[in-house]
Amino acid sequence: MRLMLHSAVMTSEIRAAMQATNSLFNSEIFGKGNMDAFDNIYTREARILPPGAPMISGGAAIKSFWADFIKATSATAATLETVEAMVDGDGVVEIGKATVTMQAPGSDATQLQVKYVVYWREEDGRWKWHVDIWNLNA
Amino acid sequence: MRLMLHSAVMTSEIRAAMQATNSLFNSEIFGKGNMDAFDNIYTREARILPPGAPMISGGAAIKSFWADFIKATSATAATLETVEAMVDGDGVVEIGKATVTMQAPGSDATQLQVKYVVYWREEDGRWKWHVDIWNLNA
């Protein structure tokens, strides 16, 4: 039996907080290479499930993964778009699309179309990614 | 502002219901090719996010996807293992692992290691997959 009385609904505050976090991923991580910005993107106990690798847990390992990814792919931008966001209890389940732009020096830019599911939690007054899984459309 | 008072916790009943649903995926879908069993696995408004394809919405399209997948891969089994299940409000976010066995006639069996995130909801008294995304470990 679950007993519950709650009114968890998507508010403009939550939506704005999510957009702010999603924007950091492009502006700070891909734009400036500022890996410390991940402290404001992922929860301390976050897990990521990247294609082609086992699950990775915790902030330090997640920073390493993305630093390696950016270096290996020459990624220069990653823009995120929320397709649907479902508030449930203390969290939000987001379905989204991402476009990752890659441009090695002297080469033309190429783009990857990605889709993802992120389970969001609030931590230290910010909305952050607690579980993050994605894959490619093609 | 969110106002909430709820006591959503993982119970043995929810866990058993989830295991029953996950078992159907192997026994009915892969074991017997009974695509109608998907009515007891996915919610009516479910979405799947498969690697290598855009998002697919709704029961009929999801059945077609899996029927095509089984035919194309000669998959004979798909066993699921829950790594973590987080109850939140009216749903559960599950991180899991899957092993998919494929065996074309006259060939040796091969296995794929898969990881996934499923967002569960209760519908018609059953716990079902509402959002389902996965990718390969290698």
Image: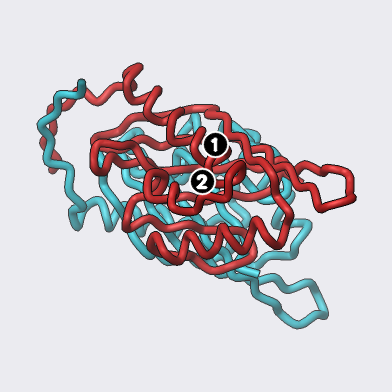
Chain colours: A red, B cyan
The mark that comes first in sequence, 1 or 2, is: 1
Under mark 2, the amino acid is: Asp
Left or right side of B15 for A128: right
Name the side, left or right, on which B72 lies relative to B129. Answer: right
Mark 1 near mark 2, Cβ–Cβ under 8 Å?
yes
Residue A67 x %, y %: 58, 60
Residue depicted at x 64% and y 65%: A52
Relative vertical location of residue B121 with respect to residue B96 in this rendering, above or below: above
Q: Which mark is residue B47?
A: 1
- In the image, residue B134 above or below residue B112: above
Q: Are marks 1 and 2 on the same chain?
A: yes
Q: Secondary structure at mark 2?
A: strand
Q: Residue at x 57, y 50 (%)?
A: A33
Q: Amino acid at mark 1?
A: Arg
Q: Could you tell me which chain the residue with mark 2 belongs to? A: B
Check the picture and name the quadrant holding the C terminus of chain B.
bottom right
The reply to whether residue A67 is in sight is: yes
Q: Name the residue at the top extreme.
A: A12
The residue drawn where x is 63% and y is 55% is B33
| Residue B36 falls left or right of residue B3 | right
Of residues B46 and A39, the one nearer the viewer is A39
What percent of the width, then of the height, locates residue B104?
A: 78, 72
Q: Residue B5 location, x and y as percent?
A: 10, 31
The residues tagged by marks 1 and 2 sit, at their Cα atoms, a distance apart of 6 Å
Position of B120 with respect to B99 (left or right) is left
Quadrant hosting residue B53: top right
Q: Say which residue label 2 marks.
A: B132
Q: Nearer the viewer, residue B55 or A16?
A: A16
- For residue A63, the mark is none
Residue in the picture at 13% in, 33% down: A4
Chain containing mark 1: B
